[in-house]
Amino acid sequence: MINNEKMKLILKIRSGVVVESVANIGGWISSPEGVHFVPGAIYPDLFPLLLEGTRTDDELASAISVHGYAIAYNAIAVLERLGVLITGNALEFSQAGESNLPGTRLAETANWVAAARAEESRRADRLFDDPLAEQLAGEAGFSWLKANPHAATTLAIRTRFFDDFLAEATLRYGIRQVVIIASGFDMRSWRIEWPEGVRLFELDRKELLTKKCSTAEASGALPSCRPTFIGADLTVEWTSLLLDESVGFDPAMPSAWLIEGLLIYLDDLQVGRLIDDVTMLSAAGSRIGIDLAAMAILDPRRNFPFLKELRVRGCPWRFGTDEPNRLLEERGWDADVCEFEEAEKRYRRRTPMWDSRMTREPKDTPGFFLVTGAKMP
């Protein structure tokens, strides 16, 4: 448990940022011994600004200096990782043994993605057809999409990109084992025409997989491959579930892995551990597809209102990188990076991603990356 005396800090929460301290705004140092707060004499001008309670979120985001805002937002991330939960305007400590990792509320993002795929399926020029997405999205999914209409095209492009990735892996490279991690309401087992002999393994929370399968069964839809559904908490050890003899996964054979829409919700350690696990289970010639956010997307000075909304919903964005190739290359994969703008051109779609709540400055700053890789011998 965090030692309040060691931290030398009194915290209050307003609008998702640290706003009061016994010291001026300072920096955080995390070590095996704990978290240390370094008084920020170099930022004395920030204290009255943060303490002021009359500014709107947008005004606050633009007014706080570059370093001070990043430190304040980073403080919250550190506290979360150490077991501190932020709820409303209070700072609460988790009970012993309570997990602060992505869980039930993160699972709600499956409804959002399903709504976006349903919206795309209605278009005459659709990039794919997902006939069951509308049923799976539910009211919660379409309510979110109504508030975030820019996401429909963004998620449609991402979906089609990874459809093409899986088609290439199975058709061109002859891979017959496909693993989708955090598959949510992904309906690729049903909506894609897979080559003969493909086995598809899906891992996610049991309740999501159960709802998806029951919806497909009720509609009379039949899978076009041999799917296996594995209920798993992907923030803890999960590889033994896939390696169970009754499942039928063979790590000695090349596999195609898809991790779509997950990594941004994990912290650095969780991301590294997950990619390490996948690498361990991947024979030479395996393929992998992941999506990543650039650091600019996670910068609260630019995207504070949008990031705040995600935090309030219980699924904050955590992980980003400006070197997306390194995540795979350092683990023995030959990586190919596609900036999202390249995918827009490929599919002849322009997504209004950068709305009033999510902006990039300067405008040529990368946003998202779609990354594929091949496992080297």
Image (cartoon, rainbow, N blue to C red):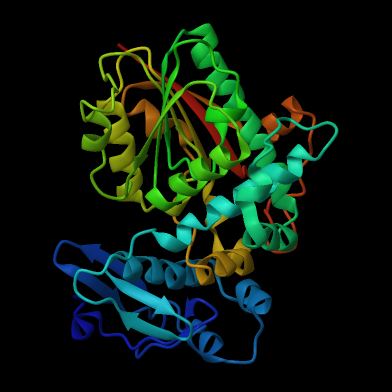
**Residue 184 visible in this rendered orientation of the protein:** yes
Q: At 38% across and 81% down in the image, what residue appears?
A: 41
- Taking 349 as reference, is 259 left or right? left
Q: Give residue 167's position: percent from left, percent from top.
A: 57, 17
Task: Give the image quarter of residue 276.
Answer: top left
Q: Give residue 325's position: percent from left, percent from top.
A: 45, 30
Q: Nearer the viewer, residue 17 or 81?
A: 81
Q: Give residue 42's position: percent from left, percent from top.
A: 42, 77
Q: At 56% across and 86% down in the image, what residue appears?
A: 49
Q: Give residue 373's position: percent from left, percent from top.
A: 45, 22
- Taking 250 as reference, is 68 left or right? right
Q: Nearer the viewer, residue 29 or 57?
A: 57
On screen, 135 above or below 302?
A: above
On screen, 251 above or below 241?
A: above
**Residue 363 visible in this rendered orientation of the protein:** no
- Taking 190 as reference, is 107 left or right? left
Q: How many marks?
A: 0
Q: Nearer the viewer, residue 241 or 84?
A: 241
**Which residue is most to the left?**
33
Q: At 37% across and 86% down in the image, what residue appears?
A: 11
**Which residue is most to the right?**
124
* Quarter the C terminus occupies: top left
Q: Nearer the viewer, residue 347 or 246?
A: 246
* Quarter the N terminus occupies: bottom left
